[in-house]
Amino acid sequence: MESRVDVNRRNFLRLAGGTVAVGAATLAGAGLATGAAAAPAHGPGPGHGPGPGHGHGKGRVLVPPGHIGIQLYSIRDKVASLGFRTVFERLSEMGYAEVEFAGYTQDQVGPITPEEIRDLLDDNGLRAVGSHRGIGDFAANMERELDIAEILGMEHVGTAQAPTDDRTVAGYLAAAEQFNGFGEAAAARGLKFYQHNHDGEFSFATDDPEVRLYDVFYDNTDPRAVYLEMDVFWAYVGQHRYPGFEPADYIRRNPHRYPLLHLKDGEVNPESEQGYDMVEFGIGDLPYTEFLSSLPGGGRRHGIWEQDNAAQAPGPGHPADSFGNAERSYVEVRSLRAERC
């Protein structure tokens, strides 16, 4: 494993515009300043140039470096085998500023307390931005979940579960009421409670094919208490499977409800029911430049990279290694610029 000095020097050279080999990649012309261009040279390896939706323009920064985070589920194999200490050290070296949790255990390394996790975050200059927990965890012991969120210093806490498995209008109305309760409890502690979507939330109610379930949830949760984290990949899968909406429209309708975005890339696959295959960020087809440029309040949201299959699906020309995917994806997210100033 490389030392912190070696990796920090490599990241400095990368961001300062030096030419550094990253596997088969050659990255050049990145700017250290927030407003500087940070565009990797085209052709960083077979099949790993910027995807069709990833233009590296000369406009404003679309995801400021201080708001680039990682959902730890992407590297859950590393958390389980190496533990939070080593994982946080590596993420800090890569340049990540924020982490979103997917649990508070490090299976093979042994027990750890929230207080110890917070110390490791602080030691590595990382911030906890949110956490995915089960609906049952909140229902069973909301105050303990909020205690942990406060210990870790996070502003947001939520779930990646669908609001309910009952895909009727009545089922989603009941779920909205439950989430309003969760949100009120979190707000009383100064926290924002959020729900992260998959594609199923964009399907239609089983008892009314004219009603989109996400609309029921969106319209019947209190916007002052229940926030939303759009997983952009799954939203586009939902658009493919259940047409009739534009993902960005939900954010534009009420921007403050979406403090968090999951930046997950997909490559078009006409043979897949989903319409896309999940791939490393930067080699897919999702229109991130257009999508992010269209949102009001650019730079205020937390952009969280996630790739569920990072340990099994390496970028072309690279070995399977979730750390490798995380590092290359950070560079691609950091490089996103609007096409115009």
Image (tube, grey):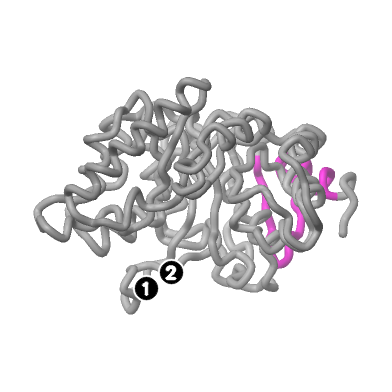
Number of numbered labels in the structure image? 2
Tell me which numbered mark, 1 or 2, is placed earlier along the sequence. 1
Q: Give the range drawn in magenta.
A: 7-30
Kind of residue at disc 1: Asn
Circle 2 sits on which residue? Answer: 277
- How many C-alpha atoms fall within 10 Å of the one at disc 2: few (<14), some, or many (≥20)? some
Q: Regarding mark 2 in the picture, which secondary structure is present there?
A: strand
Left or right, 268 with reference to 265? left
Q: Distance between the residues labelled 1 and 2?
A: 6 Å
Circle 1 sits on which residue? Answer: 269
* Label 1 close to label 2 by CB (< 8 Å): yes
Q: Where is residue 337 in the image (x, y as percent from the top left)?
A: 50, 40
Q: Can residue 55 be seen in this view?
A: no
Q: In which quarter of the image is residue 118?
A: top right
From what the image shows, is residue 54 above or below residue 293? below
Kind of residue at disc 2: Asp
Instruction: Say which residue appears at 53% left-offset and 39% top-offset.
Output: 141
From what the image shows, is residue 227 above or below residue 27? above
